[in-house]
Image (cartoon, helix red, strand yellow):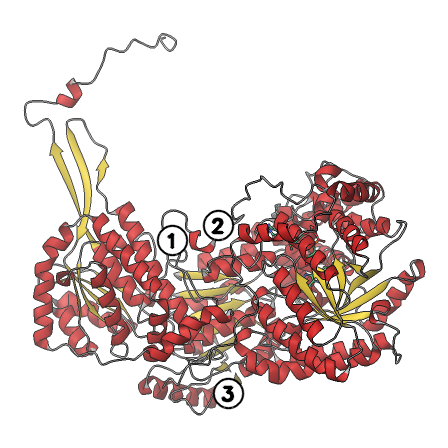
Amino acid sequence: MVTEPSPPSPRSRLPHPHRDEVEVVRELHGALPPSLDWRAVMTTASPWVQAARDTPAPFWAMESLLREYPITSAEGLALMRLAEALLRVPDAETAIALTADQLGRADFESSVVEGPHRMLASLSASAIALSKKFLPDADDGDGAGLLKRLGAQTVVAATVRAIQLLGRQFVLGRRIAEAMNESRAERKHDPKLRFSYDMLGEGARTERDAKRYFASYLDAIGAIAGGRVGPSPESADGISIKLSALFARYEDAQRARLFAELMPRVWQLVQAAARANLNLTIDAEESDRLELSLDLVEALAERIAIEFPTWGGFGLAVQAYQTRAPALVHEVARIAKAKRLRFMVRLVKGAYWDGEIKRAQELGLQGYPVFTHKRHTDISYLACAHALLGHAPHIYPQFATHNAGTIAAIVQMARARGAPFEMQRLHGMGESIYREVMRTHEPPPLRIYAPVGEHRDLLAYLVRRLLENGANSSFVHQLADESLATDALLAPPLYAVETRLPGPGQPLPPALYGAKRPNSIGVDLACAEDRVPLYHALASARIGAVPEATATDIEAAMSRLHAGFRSWSATPSAHRAGVLRRAADALQARLPEFCALLVKEGQKTLGDTVAEVREAIDFLRYYAAEADEKLVPTVLPGPTGERNTLRLHGRGVFVCISPWNFPLAIFTGQVAAALVAGNTVAAKPAEQTPFVAQALIGLLHAAGVPSGALALLHGAGETVGAALVGDARTAGVCFTGSTAVAKLINRTLAAKDGPIVPLIAETGGINAMIVDSTALPEQVVDAVVQSAFRSAGQRCSALRLLAVHESVADGVIEMIRGALQELNVGDPARLATDVGPVIDDAAFDELSKHIQRLRREAVLVGEARASSEVPRLVAPIAFELQRIADVKQEIFGPVLHIVRWGGEVDAVVEQINALGYGLTCGIQTRIDSRAQRLASLARIGNVYVNRNMIGAVVGVQPFGGEGLSGTGPKAGGPHYLYRFCSEQTVTVNTAAAGGNVELLAKDDTAAPDVASAP
Ligand SMILES: Cc1cc2nc3c(=O)[nH]c(=O)nc-3n(C[C@H](O)[C@H](O)[C@H](O)COP(=O)(O)OP(=O)(O)OC[C@H]3O[C@@H](n4cnc5c(N)ncnc54)[C@H](O)[C@@H]3O)c2cc1C
């Protein structure tokens, strides 16, 4: 049962996140102060750069290392990978394997380090190179001799120590007291220095983690305040908080819970900071959380205005790399003014650029929420800075940057305005430049953002900083590159008036696949405006009855399709491809309507429906492109006097039988492939989902598929399906469903007289994920929850069996238990719902029985809560079993089986292979060579490393398995169409009529090549 759709969210007060970059940059140029004098900026900043290069800060040694081994090199990547993973690996065996793997692929010996810290950098490089000699050879696999291993343990201990030191460059202390001691020491040199402490930790996955982070923030505020009320937030130390650390589901879809659960937590922190009169800043995170954080800020401001009207310490960070940044600045200022408050706004450029680009590409969004040229981010920063300065006294701007040019420009603009402001830098970064800035005649106030925390919470932060230090476009990186002249380093970001602005620096998501085929366009569900068409469609969608095909209907359809084959197969493949493309465009235009049908008929959640319609569009376009490339006649080489041509054509009537779990995508994929290859198609959708199939058939006919080429035949598998498969006119069968039915079809086809008919079968799997102790538990748990429980576990690719290394199993299992508690199980039409109902009563009963049995026979790990108002909800649940072999069959629902493993990881793959299925597999490890080896050992069709294992993308991850999981070829892959075709070679003796004219007509009068004569 699907209830009414969620009410549309409030309209956004910010521009759309995917605006045209050129248009935004033009506006930004217009918003810059005309008086901005970049010559003066360069004059100010050049001596800073020179001095920083002449006398680097102590930290420089590491920067040198990163410069020498940029993250784009094998060595830099190895360093970053080790920094990200090594510290969390509890078992020596795996730590050795990881270190060997990463150091093994890098060449630390050959580089010659230049620059003032040549000695230090060379020493580090030599140490790493030496370490390699002691380590077991990466190619030996994970097992190595005892002697070698003794040496290896020492090297790993040294590498761990080195990574700890690396991490410590960026962290002020493990606890707040230790950090405050450090800051006291630093203040001895500069009494005006201020700190903003950041209690490391982000992205809580469980309520327990969120509470832990909350306690550490509260504790830190108490320690910073020290029982006193400060004179002003700008003159005292403060705190920075991350909302994602305080709530496991900090997402737009969970808006209601956010206000009920996260808000009271943040308010408690705000109260503590306000009472002590210190600065509390909400850090900026991913762009899909921007609107949400703005709503929270406004709600907090309302309460602050009542309870702490004179406190001016509430703050938030604004990321200039977002195209919406300038609008955000004005909106924040509007709120502050309306509530008669003063906000402290930290302007940053933004730390998640690569993640933002990837998300937009994956979701097929129209554009990017961030600029794609670094220069545009710099321009945006300046425009936002100018705007912030103009909003005094309601805004106290805090400019966070390490870029000398940006700093000089800010100081120039601020001084011109006469508005108060401060500069900020990260602990461990920008020291040398700020040392010079603070030596100037009138140094600006400076605050250091100072992370505090243990190693386990440091890793995500550390990697972001390494990326920042190592990225080619980053100022700190370029500062270290002395081959870059100071003028080039400080070149103005602004464009001359006559300049034509550049196009996107990254291919826009719709153009991801180049000219060959447009990418399908998705919906940004985090964007209120983009959700509106879905809600409208949901409100009007109705599922009607589809008549079942009788024996007479089947007979009529088959004879029509049989008769229609001749003309359809005779149409040029380019014409058939054109029809598919028209259908794709129509489906793209009707995406909301089809999403709504999928919610209502298939019980799918909104996110799943968007992905499914996109997949159907991609299938249509992909097979059209494939037809253009593969179905054209190929002339083959041969002797003179004859022409040999290979041609492909349809086989006849293809029967396509699809399942209910992807009633649109799989249905479309099968039908489109069969049609474009020149077959006529008898399409039998699943009994539970005929309506969406009927809608698609209507769309295909409207796009130009003749009625003699395609027929929908709805009904039970035992009757309609069996009749179609058994029909003498059936020339091929494409089936997706259970292994048992696939075998039945195979036997039926084999028993028939006449030609041997091909069967393409895609069936189920007992899909496993192997996790070793180098994997990041948070990433593992995200992947597990998505793979095992999304779509109520009703995907062929869904995770059924999680094999976790014993050394980390307790922690991972605990986190899965907590993450299960965070899932919303209910009405699929609601945006907040993660897991909807299972497809029908039979599925529900089957799953309930299986769960009852597991409750008796296995150890319950945890389960989600299901709403009682929606029928057929199976709450996601996880059990621990003793052995992999205990998982005997595919359970098609949100039930996860977990086993622990120890010893040789290869043996785990062998046990998984022994289950007989081979559809999907997940591998979570930071040991690259291990991932590659396990993937090649696995007799499995789709292997996913360090990510979830669902949602295969057409043409990107061709989908289909081996063994009990199917016959192949893979759907959405380059070999698929061939299976729908018959092949013909035509050999023409071109010399038959009289002689070989072609040969005789060849010009033989050219002069001999004298130079090459003997
Ligand atoms: C005190 C402090 C607090 C911070 N707090 C936050 C925070 O809450 N949230 C947050 O996200 N970040 C935060 N940061 C990090 C910040 O966003 C920047 O990553 C970092 O400061 C680098 O900017 P820069 O001006 O120092 O260096 P620059 O080298 O001048 O700029 C680098 C930045 O440019 C942008 N960029 C790089 N390549 C491209 C491209 N191709 N197209 C468009 N833009 C590009 C990125 O934002 C990158 O970080 C903070 C930084 C400081 C100093």
How far, Cα to Cα, is label 3 from label 1?
A: 41 Å
Q: Earlier in the sequence, mark 3 or mark 2?
A: 2
Task: Say whether residue 149 is visible.
Answer: no
Question: Any atom of ligand 1 within 8 Å of the CB at mark 1?
Answer: no
* Amino acid type at mark 2: Pro
The quadrant where residue 157 appears:
bottom right
Give the quarter of the figure containing the N terminus. Answer: bottom left
Q: Position of residue 567 (x, y in %)?
A: 11, 53
Q: Residue at x 22, y 67 (%)?
A: 698
Q: How many marks?
A: 3
Q: Are marks 2 and 1 in contact (CB under 8 Å)?
A: no
Q: Quadrant of ligand 1?
A: bottom right
Pick out the residue farthest to the bottom. 868
Tell whether 879 sits left or right of 177.
left
Task: Say whether residue 275 is visible.
Answer: yes
Foreground label between 3 and 1: 1
- The residue pinned by badge 1 equals 518
How many C-alpha atoms fall within 10 Å of the one at disc 2: few (<14), some, or many (≥20)?
Answer: some
- The residue pinned by badge 3 equals 865
* Amino acid type at mark 1: Pro
Q: Residue at x 82, y 81 (%)?
A: 275
Q: Which mark is residue 507?
A: 2
Q: Is residue 361 above or below residue 688?
A: above
Q: Secondary structure at mark 1?
A: loop
Foreground label between 3 and 2: 2
